[in-house]
Image (cartoon, rainbow, N blue to C red):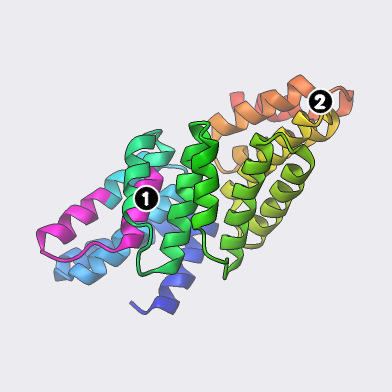
Amino acid sequence: MQQAGRAGILALSLEHPDQAVDQFQAALSRAELRDDIAAIADYGYDLAVAELALNHPKVALVAARTVIAEVRRRGSNVSTSLILVEATALYRTGALSEADGLAASIEGSGDPHVNFQACFLRGLIADKRSDIGGLQAARRCMAKPTIVAERADAQELSALISLRRRESAPAEKEAESAADLRRQVRDYRGMARALALAGEAAQQAGSTATASSLYLEAGRSAAAQGDRQSARQWLHRALSLAQDSELRGEVQHELSGLRQ
């Protein structure tokens, strides 16, 4: 499959992941029928990405590992992009140490985009561990961003660093910039995460009304994507900070929708 075609298909998988999963599963089955290992690796990767977009990290992890095992069984090299998907799925399931080890193994790879994303993932893991040194190291290991998604990654890590330094104003600005960039590339999961980060920065600065509104936006977006756990977390934060009765009503409406 040509790279340009793969890019188009993967963009579709992010916008309509439910449809993409069926398409990629069918394509993977055909590739297995032909015993075409290159196509198996390609479509297995695409399937795992689509499952991540559907917020199914455990399913994505199984898909990625199944293909990796098949590629290795044939004596072929596993692509760094497939290892990155495995690491991302591990991170999303809470296996931070294993995810960090895999991401570290592909830092400095021949693919600059994979290397950039591996650094970003390690930054998120470091932040989860409250490791400001690791977070700063991850930001330094990023090359100059060349695409919009990479600019969003860089802005998000910069926002996290500013937040941990208690530099609330730049953290909020950087997080909102990251959210805008994620919106441009239709990375709505990343957009919701950046909005929640902006909300945390506003809360740290004492701007409770702004923080509540940002948490509401993040929670609403997460709910629309089927990420009920994140949605509940951010909506409850919004409710705890909301003082305006109209805003409280909006948050309670979103929470009631999650209970249905």
At x 25%, y 49%, the residue is 65
At x 35%, y 39%, the residue is 58
**Magenta residues (range):** 65-89
The picture quadrant where one finds residue 83 is bottom left
Looking at the image, is mark 2 or mark 1 earlier in the sequence?
1
Q: Which residue is mark 2?
A: 249
Please tell me whether residue 70 belongs to the stretch shown in magenta.
Answer: yes
Secondary structure of the residue carrying tag 1 is helix
The picture quadrant where one finds residue 15 is bottom right
Q: Which residue is mark 1?
A: 103
Q: Residues within 10 Å of mark 2 (few under 14, many from 20)?
A: few
Secondary structure of the residue carrying tag 2 is helix
**In-front residue for pair 123/83:** 123
- Looking at the rendered image, the quarter that the C terminus falls into is top right
Q: Position of residue 252 (x, y in %)?
A: 74, 24
Q: Is residue 37 above or below residue 236?
A: below
